[in-house]
Image (spheres, grey):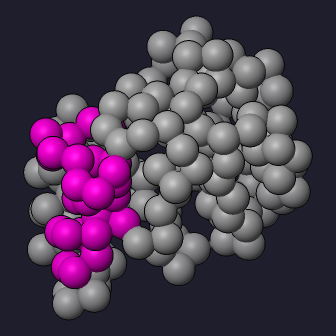
Amino acid sequence: MCCIIYKPKGVQMPTLDTLNKVQRINHHGYGFVSSKHRYKTMDYQKFLVHLSKVGIEEECIIHMRWATHGSKCRKNCHPFVENGVLPIQSVNDMTDSEIFFRSQVYPLVMKYGYESKVTESVMMAAAGSSKFAMMYKGKVKLYGDYTKLNGVYYSNLRWL
């Protein structure tokens, strides 16, 4: 189970202490995307250096991976340029989320649009007990049940 963290525009990043706690149990890769930055790595210290460049006025989705499908490598760290645990068999060492987004979500976004009812219904149905965060053209949508702490949204609080 990974941890997805969403920092809205105008909200401070989670503290280093919080990030360190999340990292201790989600240590199979790190990545983030904001309106101006995108980075993924297997090196936590490099991740922190790049994450520190994200400004308070940027929305940011942070992903710390606990591998369930696909190998533990940079290629399988989120976020994906094209793209929870899904009942999907791994193909070509891709993660379950990447397979789902490439095969189902992005074709719908291209055909019907990011905010279409068709895309929304597929995302909501797929989310089930999983959680997704998606940024498209700087706009973020969260799917699933997130917990809000100090203005930041967390997909789970296992690290507390």
Residue 125 lies, in percent from the top left, at: 11, 51
Specify the quadrant of the image occupied by residue 109. Answer: bottom left
Specify the quadrant of the image occupied by residue 33. Answer: bottom right
Quarter that holds the C terminus:
top right
Specify the quadrant of the image occupied by residue 57. Answer: bottom right
Q: Residue furthest bottom?
A: 111
Q: Is residue 41 left or right of residue 57?
A: left
Q: How many numbered marks, from 0 up?
A: 0
- Using the image, determine if residue 104 lies above or below residue 44: below
Q: Residue at coordinates 74% horizontally, 21% vertically from top-left?
A: 20
Q: Is residue 95 magenta?
A: yes
Residue nearest the viewer, comparing 155 with 97:
97
Residue 9 lies, in percent from the top left, at: 69, 58
Q: Is residue 117 magenta?
A: no
Q: Is residue 49 left or right of residue 111?
A: right
- Using the image, determine if residue 117 lies above or below residue 123: below
Q: Residue at coordinates 29% horizontally, 64% vertically from top-left?
A: 101
Q: Is residue 126 left or right of residue 19?
A: left
Q: Residue furthest top?
A: 160
Quarter that holds the N terminus:
top left
Q: Residue at coordinates 59% horizontally, 38% vertically from top-left?
A: 29
Residue 62 lies, in percent from the top left, at: 60, 46
Q: Residue at coordinates 22% horizontally, 81% vertically from top-left?
A: 107
Magenta residues span: 83-108
Residue 80 lies, in percent from the top left, at: 47, 62
Q: Is residue 153 visible?
A: no
Q: Is residue 22 visible?
A: yes
